[in-house]
C-alpha cells in the first residue's frame, strides 16, 4: 500500500512548450504533496508544497509562474513546467506523507524531463 | 535551521564486508530521521526510520541504523554488503513544524564484487 503513481516517467519537449507531471495517491488520500527537483549527482531540492484546496507554498527561489502546482483533489497533484527551457531539464519527484506509516513518506517514481 | 550532513560523496566496500554510510543532523527538538535509497532514474525507496524508542533501528534489505543523540548521528549500516546494494543513499530529517523533509546530499555506495 501507500503508492504514489507519477506520470510520465520520461518526457522530452521543445523549448517554449509546457509539460504537466501528475502524481496520484492510489490507496490513500494525500492532503499534502511535496515536489522535489534533483540535479545529476545531487540531492533532492524541495520546490514546493501543495495542499488540497489551497495555494501551493513555494520555496525561496522557485518561480511560481514557471512551476504551476495544482492540488485539485485528495488524490491528485500536478506540476506544470511552463515555457520550458533547457535549464529546466531535471528529474522531478513527488512525495506524500502516508498516514498509516507512522510519519513515513512515500515517493513517486520520478519524471525525467528533457527540454531540447 | 534543520540540516542533514552526509560527509562522504562515495563509499566503496567489497562484497561480504560490513558497510557504514554516515549521517549527522542538526535539529531543534527531537528528530524524526530517515534513510532512503535511490536506484538510477527511480524515485526514493524507504529503508528505515527513527521516531522514538530503541536507538538501533532495523529496516529493509538487512539495513539498520543507530541513533546517537550525543553525537547527533544516524549512521546506516549493514553487516554484509551485496553488489545489489550499490545505489544512492539519502539521510533525511523531518521538520515537525511543517512536515517538510530535508535531505542530505546523498552518498553513492559501490559494492565491489
Image (cartoon, grey):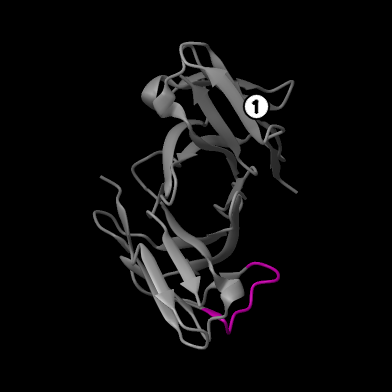
Reading the image, the residue beneath label 1 is B22
Magenta residues span A59-67
Q: Residue at x 37, y 24 (%)?
A: B61
Relative side of A60 to A88, left or right: right
Tag 1 secondary structure: loop
Residue B63 image position (x, y, % from top left):
45, 22
Which quadrant would residue B24 be assigned to in this image?
top right
Residue A24 image position (x, y, % from top left):
31, 63
Q: Residue at x 42, y 50 (%)?
A: B43
Relative side of A68 to B4, left or right: left
Along the viewing direction, whichever of A69 and A100 lies nearer the viewer: A69
Along the viewing direction, whichever of A41 and A92 lies nearer the viewer: A41
- Asked if residue A116 is positioned above or below residue B95 in the image, the reply reads below
Query: Is residue A70 part of the magenta span, yes or no?
Result: no
- Asked if residue A46 is positioned above or below residue B32 in the image, the reply reads below
- Asked if residue A13 is positioned above or below residue B3 in the image, the reply reads below
Along the viewing direction, whichever of B69 and B108 lies nearer the viewer: B108
Query: Is residue A62 part of the magenta span, yes or no?
Result: yes
**Pointer 1 indicates a residue of which chain?**
B
Amino acid at each position: 500500500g501507500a503508492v504514489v503513481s507519477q506520470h510520465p516517467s520520461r518526457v522530452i519537449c521543445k523549448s517554449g512548450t509546457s509539460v504537466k507531471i501528475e502524481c496520484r495517491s492510489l490507496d490513500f488520500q494525500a492532503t499534502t504533496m511535496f515536489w522535489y527537483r534533483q540535479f545529476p549527482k545531487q540531492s533532492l531540492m524541495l520546490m514546493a508544497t501543495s495542499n488540497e484546496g489551497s495555494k501551493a507554498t513555494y520555496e525561496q527561489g522557485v518561480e511560481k509562474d514557471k512551476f504551476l502546482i495544482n492540488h485539485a483533489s485528495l488524490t491528485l497533484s500536478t506540476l506544470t513546467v511552463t515555457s520550458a527551457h533547457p535549464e529546466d531539464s531535471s528529474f522531478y519527484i513527488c512525495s506524500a506523507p502516508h498516514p498509516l506509516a507512522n510519519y513515513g513518506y512515500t515517493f513517486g517514481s520520478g519524471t525525467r524531463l528533457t527540454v531540447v | 535551521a534543520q540540516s542533514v550532513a552526509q560527509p562522504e560523496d562515495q563509499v566503496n566496500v567489497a562484497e561480504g564486508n560490513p558497510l557504514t554510510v554516515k549521517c549527522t543532523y542538526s535539529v531543534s527538538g527531537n528528530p524524526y530521521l530517515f534513510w532512503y535509497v535511490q536506484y538510477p532514474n527511480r524515485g526514493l525507496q524507504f529503508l528505515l526510520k527513527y521516531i522514538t524508542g530503541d536507538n538501533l533501528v532495523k529496516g529493509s534489505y538487512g539495513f539498520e541504523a543507530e541513533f546517537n543523540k550525543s553525537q547527533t548521528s544516524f549512521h546506516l549500516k549493514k553487516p554484509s554488503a551485496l553488489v545489489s546494494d550499490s545505489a544512492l543513499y539519502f539521510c533525511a530529517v523531518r521538520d515537525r513544524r511543517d512536515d517538510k523533509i530535508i535531505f542530505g546530499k546523498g552518498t553513492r555506495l559501490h559494492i565491489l564484487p
